[in-house]
Amino acid sequence: MNDTQLDALVEAADEGIDYDGLRVTHDEGSYTFETPGEPYEGLDEDGLREVATENPWLVSNWYFWTQVGRPEPEQDFLRWLEGADERSVTKRYESMADGGLTESWGQLHIEISLGDDGTRVYTVRNEEDADADLDSLAVHTDPLDARELVKHDDRGRYRPLKTAPTLPTGWAFVDLDGRALGRAVDVIYPVTIANWHLERQGELDVSHWVPTMERQSGIYGVIQTWDRGEGHEHVNWVAEACCDDSQCLKRREWGYDAETDLEVDGGDGEFPCREPCSLVIAAARQWTKLEGEETRTYEFELTPSEKEQIEAIIDTVADGEADEVREADVYDGANRYRTRFLRAKRFDEDGNLCGVPTDDE
């Protein structure tokens, strides 16, 4: 705590202070300073300053949250990170002083430590690097550096969906204040803080499937022709494919329309998804075209194990687990050598399964 904070406390006492367990009032030259443990009454200004100095955490906490101007969504987010509505000032300050106050935001691991005079210092890294020494990571202080850091996953593949659970590892942002932390999070997970805040205020503007698709034009206008009747099963298929926790860290809040929810679970993410994203729209355009085809009956001869193997291959690819199948594990249906054996046995030279062509001709 410093003189600036003490001066602000004395000045604010005229209007009264009631914040996070601290109450300060000024009435006819007499000050009252109340903490969760003890009230101090009948104080003159010097007495107020003396008692405030003996309770630096309460005073600096009040100053940090009320006297430093910041946008409401950012303020709400920072208080949520340290559990300000559930933990007392003492518990929070003790944890921050020990460097043990942490929270997750998607795949981000956010550490909160205590800076000078009650300020907060934030460190951000991938959750998988939570226990790594900073010396082993690429350390940054400019949150805009995240633009390049998160473009590709750890295998070097471009990440078209910012909220996909493929955030690369090996980096950390250190010595951030609240404004810089908010900027870093917004670069890594755009608009998630703003939408999370709007949802908490009951003001999140959700755009459901129908109105979103009605806005599509040009090559995407074809999606408006795809509708599977009252069950809207096609939208459930889309949500199951794209909006699962394994594919996106947002929690889906949009449904078929304002009156019709989807049967597929929306996920457990901390921040909401207010409308079908551009990736969903692009995928839905392709599925609309593919679903316009008429079904046909094909006949294949497979052993029971081969049928199960094809099912295992589809599951493994759909869940993004192909890289986890060990080459030596020939008991796994999606094993590369076992799959190559199936292809050698059941595909003809033109690549047709069991020699059955896709088209009659």
Image: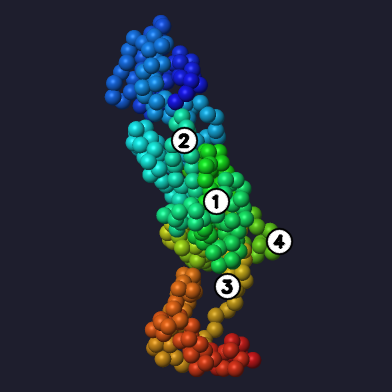
Q: How far across and how far down the image is residue 19, in percent?
A: 40, 26
Q: Amino acid at mark 4?
A: Gly
Work out whether residue 210 or residue 15 is closer to the camera in this orientation and state it.
Answer: 15
Q: Amino acid at mark 3?
A: Glu
Distance Cα–Cα, label 3 vs label 1: 48 Å
Q: Nearer the viewer, mark 4 or mark 2?
A: 2
Among the two numbered marks 2 and 1 on one chain, the one whose residue lies closer to the N terminus: 2
Q: Which mark is residue 139?
A: 1
Among the two numbered marks 3 and 4 on one chain, the one whose residue lies closer to the N terminus: 4
Q: Which mark is residue 115?
A: 2
Q: How far across and how far down the image is residue 110, in percent?
A: 46, 47
Image: 63 above or below 204? above
Work out whether residue 202 or residue 184 is closer to the camera in this orientation and state it.
Answer: 184
Q: Nearer the viewer, mark 3 or mark 1?
A: 1
Image: 100 above or below 257? above
Distance Cα–Cα, label 4 vs label 1: 44 Å
Among the two numbered marks 4 and 2 on one chain, the one whose residue lies closer to the N terminus: 2
Q: How far across and how far down the image is residue 276, in percent?
A: 56, 56
- Give the structural element (helix, strand or loop) at label 1: strand
- Give the structural element (helix, strand or loop) at label 2: loop
- Residue assigned mark 4: 218
Looking at the figure, which quarter contains the C terminus?
bottom right
Q: Amino acid at mark 1?
A: Val
- Residue assigned mark 3: 291
- Give the structural element (helix, strand or loop) at label 4: helix
Distance Cα–Cα, label 4 vs label 2: 53 Å
What residue lies at 57% left-to-right and 89% top-to-bottom?
352
